[in-house]
Image: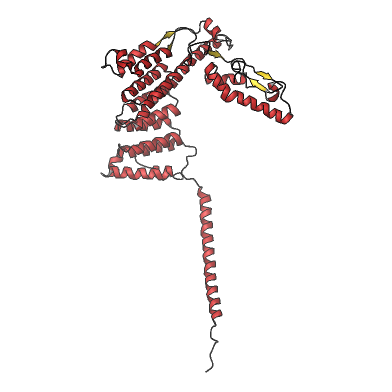
Amino acid sequence: MIPLSEPETPMGRLRRRFLKWAAFGALFAALATGAIGMQRARLREIGFYRPYIDSLNVPRKEYAKSVALGYDTILADFLYMRAIQAFGGQWKLAGATDEMMHRFRRYFDFMTELDPTLLSAYRLGSLVLSEEGHDYLGAIDLLKKGWFANPDKYRLPYLAFYTSWYSLKNDKMARLWLNRAVRSADCPEWVRRQQTIVDRESGHRRAAMERWIWEYLNGLDTRDENIRRTARMHFQDDTDEWNRDVLHKALARYMEDHDNRTPGSLEALDAAGYLKDYESCDYYKMMKLIDSIDLGGQQEWIGSPSHRAIDLLGTISEAVFAKRSGIPPTPFDPDPARDRYYLRRDLTPDLSSTVFEAQQVVVSFTYTRDFLKQALLPAVRARMNEFFSANWRYPFWPAEAFPEGLKILDPPTGTWNYDPLTGRVASPTFPDL
């Protein structure tokens, strides 16, 4: 019998399988390419960032309990997770409108009405309102609602303090919220210590110093060497800031009265009567009292071991805070022959206003010596060496190495001692540097 077709060879079977899988692969590649193309087109259409507007549509907070049907905390948790998805995912607020901000506030109001103890909701809501919508007062109102519901928790009033202090720059509001935070039982020590920073930065110098004295005395009771060391450092630094603040305010009054002209020196400022009856801290008397306690003479100094930190604080405050007149001594050395405050002479007109705002027009010689050693002299000497490398000689005068203008000068004198043969630049005030 004659076969109708020849038997399939092994090579033929392999070719047939290859063609079948090749056709299947081509079909898959075509479908995948089409799907990816459609997806990319859709993404271009809707944009990469798309606000989750639908998640913000909730009823008024008065209906929260009715909507929850008894599952208040469960619904609050669900809304909180939805908020994380919306604001923690690919969400961007571009040009927030009042309507959108109202929607945000209503969303978090509704959520916290269901579960007033959900602290994370207040924290997330304040973050969204302040950082994304720049509605700082709305964020503080939400935190205030949370504080009323959770008065024993420090976190919410602390966040309100943070927003008031760093975003609104409102000293009074910041101090109010920080005081509320520190009265909470769970308030950590590092939050309490921020009161000294707020007091100092807002101009309450005495209150800031008294807080550090209090911290130091508590460090004695608890034998905390670290806090005592930190307090001692602040005694000196805060006294220096206090003194310079007094001198800068007096200088500002003088310049206002004399057509923006400076008096030329602090001695002239004092002679003109601008340094009279200001409150200051007698640093050296304070340290003498502190040392008498710190060196084991506590009972001998106070007369009775029953006195505690509050009694010592009152005694020290009465002794060291007083009205005085004249140029205050620096807290680095009581001898004016070795250290004193002075009016800088190195400031150019384009730098004067910036430096004045930073309260660096009046400084001490101790500060100046460190500033010269660490910053000014290395910068000028490096420029001299660069000039020598480019020209095979040192400049005839320091200004020659500064084509943009010589703005780095010796602060007390406004000039340099310079040797053009060796290129050595030295301070007339501190020639040993």
| Foreground of the two, 419 or 38 | 419
Please provide percent x and percent y for residue 278.
44, 10
- Vertical placement of residue 242 versus 18, above or below: above
Question: Quarter-wise, where is residue 124 in the image?
Answer: top left
Residue at far bottom of view: 1
Residue 60 visible to the viewer: no
| Foreground of the two, 427 or 90 | 427
Looking at the rendered structure, the number of numbered marks drawn on it comes to 0
| Foreground of the two, 74 or 212 | 212
205 relative to 340 in the view: left or right: left
11 relative to 127 in the view: left or right: right
Q: Residue at x 37, y 39 (%)?
A: 107
Q: Residue at x 46, y 20 (%)?
A: 237
Q: How is the image coloured?
A: secondary structure
Please provide percent x and percent y for residue 379.
62, 26
Please provide percent x and percent y for residue 51.
45, 44
Q: Residue at x 54, y 73 (%)?
A: 18
| Foreground of the two, 8 or 132 | 8
Please provide percent x and percent y for residue 50.
47, 45
- Vertical placement of residue 358 versus 28, above or below: above
